Image (tube, rainbow, N blue to C red):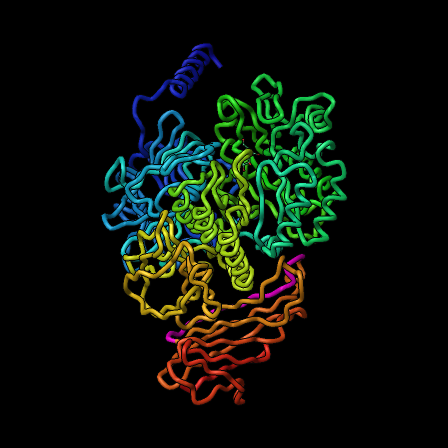
Amino acid sequence: MNKLKWVTIAITMFILSMNSVMAQSTYTFIGSFKSLNTSDNAVTVQAQNGAVKLEYFQDVGFRVRYSFSGKFDKVFSYATVDPMPGRDKLSVDEENERILVTHGNLTAVVHKNPVRLEFRTEDGFTYFKETLGAGHHDGKITEVTNSPKNANYYGLGEKASALNRTGRHFEFWNTDTPGYEMNQDPLYQTYPFYIGLVNKKAFGVYYDNSFHSSFDFSARLDGNVTFASDGGELRFYVFYGPQASDVLKKYTTLTGRTQLPPKWGLGYQQSRWGYYPADEFRRMAYEFRSRHIPCDVLYSDIDYMRGYRVFTWDKSLFPHPQKLLSDLQDKGFKTVVIIDPGVKKDSSYFMYQEGVKNDYFVKLPNGDNYIGRVWPGKTAFPDFSNPDTRDWWSSKYKINMDQGIDGFWNDMDEPSSFGGKTIPNYTVFNKDGHKASALEMHNQYGLLMARSAFEGMKKADPNKRPFIITRAAFSGVQRYSSVWTGDNSAKWDDVYLTMPMIMGLGVSGVPYAGFDIGGFNGSPSGEMYMRFLQIGAFMPFSRSHTVLNSDRQEPWSYGQKYEYINRKLIEYRYQLIPHLYTAFFEHTQDGEPIIRPLFWEYQDDPKTYNIDTQFFFGDNVMVAPVIHQGKNERSLYLPKGNWFRITGDRKEYSGGQNITVPAPINSIDVYDKEYDTPLSGVPVFARGGSVVPMQEVQQYVGQKDIDTAQLHIFTDGSGSSKLYEDSGKGYDYRDGAYRLTRFQTKDLKSEFTVNIQQEGHYSGAYKTFACTVYGLKSKPESVTVDGKNVDYHYNPDKATVTFQAQSDISNIDIKK
Ligand code: MIG
């Protein structure tokens, strides 16, 4: 090669590298079409300023990848399932101005000049359409798409604002935000997933990107939805409904679902920062049992550790942890301990020693371990994106589990570090061998710590269902953990926020969620605590928790009257456990949320699109709590159909209207045994045509063998309901040790029938169904079960019929 050629190459290289380091002054968009390449179940379009690749994943939808270099690396994602669903074949049709890429009845249209994508159904409904489309600027990426005038947006997880995201701007950067305010953003968790509702049809988009990012729903740029991220690939999945539940089913096929938790995890749970020493736990156990307030789990906050060293005990406060934990077990309590990621920098502490020796910690660019400051003082941070770190960390859970710990509570995993809030952006992570900075790994820290915890519990005892709860999270966390909404406050605003936050998580694929009942910061009044509990008793995760040095915050801390009401609420939760457990099961099947917004069930009714303070608790049961001080009633919207109030007076209402119902603060003053008035402070309704399975109260899950399910059967409507049963622990259900009962009701003029079908064989299943049928205005002519007349009791005041049946029946027929 001659000298000139070398010089030319050198100059070209120089100019090329200058180009990539020189800041661009404006965003560059993808530009116009150059060529089309179809191969290997993928369609790649090269454009002026980059390329776009389309693929279709089975039961998920289209994946879109943009590359501004024109090349595509192998995809690596912590959020999506591994292995990924298979890729389907696409049919491609190139025209002059556009390319049609079709899978089944969905088509991606690639317009050529400029290259812009549009997704539509066979019948011509465009649900997702690029306007400015895909652009980049110094590694930052953006995607601008059309937002029709009547569009409504949901999702993004635990945002502290109204459920409907339309007209708002949001950010994602997991942040420790103690005492957050209404509309404060960002909070602890990141879910770059939303559901759009246009012309009553739903679609969804998931941006598989963990950098600091933002979503703008027609706020900064009217008529558009903008996703922008500070880095990474512009890679997203587009899901089509038309039902919102179809969208979530597809999203959770991609990012996974929550498996059945141990059934005790559905029980009421009690926590506070400051339960110590050991005898305080014994006292709590005694209080719950002697007051007959059901409770399954007690929590230990950071106080149990020796100088906040994870996987240790402070022996001066907890001299015999094993003895304590077995005493608590004897009384039917499970114990969960908090785990913070920060490892105390202490050369005599085994976790620090092992971490330093084996390079398990997050590093500075010069290779030193990064040291921050959290509760233990100076701390190193495990790099959970290093597979060796995950292996090591997960092997430690056995230490606590062998002592009798049943579950783990991951905190400070944003990660939070005092002074500067989090660790620096330039810290270095392993990313399973790919190497990345905190810019990319920050938002996934909690996800990966939860994964380690999950794997740790599995390792220590493969037959135990893991119980993990985490504060920080990213899409996919539902595979490993439940979540709570961090440090809320004893404020009325926060009583309201509980509902849009938990519904926001549910529609974003995270069903197992809850909030600190009573509020973390500050001390609620008895009234406020009760109002929190009237919501919290219906949450998948139901736990009271509060800050160090606040007033006592147990269900009995507000005088006898409130203790009575609070006990009734917690008892009611336990009565509803068969229904709640069934909702958990449903999620495992299709990703359904447990707490559902009204629009979820009534997508055709736009009156439901902005309701933040009513929710479905599993199938068929709707809760409309009071969220204002001094209020004794609640106005609410009943969607079409018929509704039976099941707390308080048991009145029947017809839907499609707003109603106002009593919801007294001092419901106990009007105590009437027959109508359970202590519960009348919270309006709860069952849908006509549904079957709601309940059972007797127990003080903790599994306290006694219960052989009778109480089936509450509501007429004046037709519909389907389910009851799922298994042992509540272990994995026998995967080998068929479960029973799933499906109820189908039919309400005709002359008769009301329930068809019952069962699958699976579970030896511990209910033997008897104690049935109560509601809404029978006159005494029925006959009640038959599997064709045989049964003895029944008719109560004209309540318009109910009650009777007993075996649990393996297949038909109930009530001749009106
Ligand atoms: O810096 O462990 O959200 O539930 O009680 C505060 C003490 C650390 C924050 C958690 C809270 C927990 C508290 N933690």
**At 45% from the left edge and 84% from the top edge, which residue is drawn?**
814
Q: How many marks?
A: 0
**Can residue 268 be seen at all in this image of the molecule?**
yes
Question: In the picture shown, does residue 289 fall above or below 645?
Answer: above
Indicate yes or no whether the magenta region holds residue 343: no
Q: Quadrant of residue 273 in the image?
A: top right
Of residue 357 and residue 57, the one placed in the foreground of this image is 357
Of residue 375 and residue 416, the one placed in the foreground of this image is 375
Viewport quadrant of the C terminus: bottom left
**At 67% from the left edge and 47% from the top edge, which residue is drawn?**
406
In which of the image's four quarters is ligand 1 placed? top right
Please state if 154 lies on the left or on the right of 364 as rendered. Answer: left
Indicate yes or no whether the magenta region holds residue 717: yes
Residue 326: x, y in percent?
Answer: 74, 48
Question: In the picture shown, does residue 221 fall above or below 672?
Answer: above
**At 31% from the left edge and 57% from the top edge, which residue is drawn?**
635
Of residue 122 and residue 150, the one placed in the foreground of this image is 150
**At 73% from the left edge and 53% from the top edge, which residue is drawn?**
330
Residue 272: x, y in percent?
Answer: 57, 40
Q: Which residues are magenta?
A: 716-730
Residue 723: x, y in percent?
Answer: 54, 68
